[in-house]
Amino acid sequence: MDAGLPSQTITDLMFRLGFEAVARQGDLDDGVRAVVRDQPAEVQAAWVETLSRMIAAAELVS
């Protein structure tokens, strides 16, 4: 939201990420970036930061 996206766009991006995670079966690096490839640089940076935080949080509870 800090990058200026409406909540519906964020929801759409998260659904696309979920699809990439299922469809790629393994290496998701390219898929993660592909989801926001058509977005402005600020959105891409926010996307990477958010996913990095989600991964770090998951590692703390594992």
Image (cartoon, grey):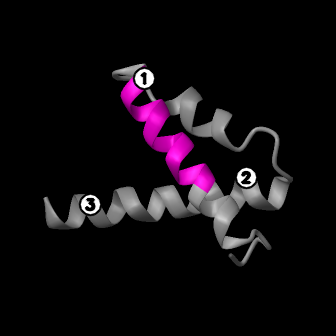
Of label 3 and label 1, which has the lower sequence position? 1
To which quarter of the image does residue 10 belong?
A: bottom right
Label 2 sits on residue: 44
Q: Residue at position x 58%, y 27% from top?
A: 30
Q: How many marks?
A: 3
Quadrant of the drawing holding the C terminus: bottom left
Left or right of 14? Residue 25 is: left
- Number of other residues with Cα within 10 Å of mark 2, as a class: few under 14, some 14 to 19, many 20 or more: some
The answer to if 22 sits in the magenta stretch is yes
Q: Main secondary structure of the magenta part?
A: helix
Query: In the rendering, at what x and y percent does residue 2 appear?
Result: 72, 78
Q: Residue at position x 80%, y 73% from top?
A: 4
Q: Residue at position x 55%, y 41% from top?
A: 16
Residue at far right of view: 40
Label 1 sits on residue: 23
The segment highlighted magenta reads: 12-23
